[in-house]
Amino acid sequence: MPTTTTVLAFGAWLKNTACLWMDGQAHWSALHGDLSDPGACAALQASVDALLARARAAGRPVQAVAHDLHPDFFSTQLAVATAQQLGVPAIGVQHHHAHLAAVMAGHGLHGPSVGLALDGVGLGTPDAAFGTWGGELLWLDGPRWARLGHLYPLALPGGDRAAREPWRMAASALHALGRADEIAPRFGPVVGEAVAGGLRQMLDRGLNSPLTSSAGRWFDAAAGALGICWRQQDEAQAAIALEQAAARALTRRAGLPALPGARIDGHHRLDLRPLLAALFDAPDVDVAAAGFHLALADALAAWLIDAAHAHATGTACLGGGCFFNRILRERVLARLHEAGLQAWLPAEQGCGDAGLALGQAWVAVRQLRHAPAPGGHPTTIPTENEQSETCA
């Protein structure tokens, strides 16, 4: 990466940090927190001013700013306003592309790679069939990338409310399994007959039930199916409780069997419905939670290994907050290493959104380097997968 390229990246909505890429190094702001808090927004503004002053003092003026694709984020709006003030480009970077780019940047990786970006939510590209992503199989090389596949989408009954109430995601999974008649009997005693029945009608009619490929929501569905967590008071509460249940079973018994395997359908989606089907009425909650983790990790690893072979790369990147899950992380890494792949996790700021700005900056620098000449066209991505979504 040329040392003369300077980019300021504005980070994510959750766990926001800003990052100044200057002279081939990342210079981080403090952690600001979630931008729903006005204090965090003010802290980001102050950090941006400080990082711009640092770049000016070093004689390295910012040549571009980078931000998330979501237009309503304060970080996006501040980035666009800052770019206008500086007279430089504002470069939007898709959320999950940035997760994996952060891995590439943190380890100084070059050349093409494949990766899994697994988290709770991130806005997809405008041309995608649905806008909320979170379980993504990607190919990337410099500024070019392709969505090779994604997790089978689940409906979010009630929209954002479904992310706070895992029972809703479990009901969504039942509906996706063709078992909608079970929703009211299962969840009525917990949330009320009227609420459970209304949610079933919402799913039947597709009302206020946007689709998501989020891995985090599949973890919520599993926790809801096992009765581990009905409503979340804290972020990732259901997923953490599910991992704790799995850890108890794995501590007691070695060699627990995985659940029935996931499958890849004709639309290059990893379908996790067979895993969820085995959780309802499981006789041992902890054992079922462990089986879910093992089967999910094995399916994800096999999916990624196949993609690496298809695209002639030995490099695999793992990013997104779901990889804070130790059982998932270690099982996937073990499978990838057994297959002879070099597997990498983020080097800075952890797997979650706190490190996203580094990936944004990495992509923006490469877009500046590979920008087409006047009248030229963006480079297309070589891929064997005709169904992949290609972006440059």
Image (cartoon, helix red, strand yellow):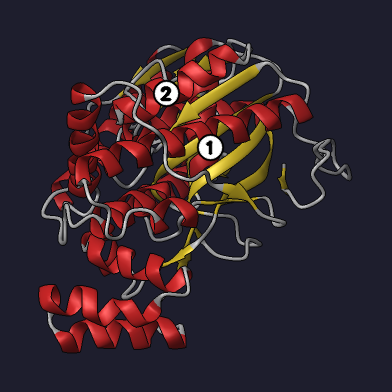
Residue ID for mark 1: 299
What residue is shown at x 60% (from left), y 31% (from top)? 302
Residue 72, image x, y percentages: 39, 61
- Disc 2, SS: helix
- Classify 12 as above or below 3: below
Comparing 100 with 197, the one in front is 197
The residue at the far front in this view is 283
Image quarter of residue 27: top left
Circle 1 crowding by C-alpha within 10 Å: few under 14, some 14–19, many from 20: many
Residue ID for mark 2: 331
Instruction: Judge left or right: residue 353 versus residue 287.
Output: right
Residue 220, image x, y percentages: 29, 54
Q: What amino acid is at disc 1?
A: Ala
Image quarter of residue 33: top left
- Disc 1, SS: helix
**Which is nearer the N-term, disc 1 or disc 2?**
1
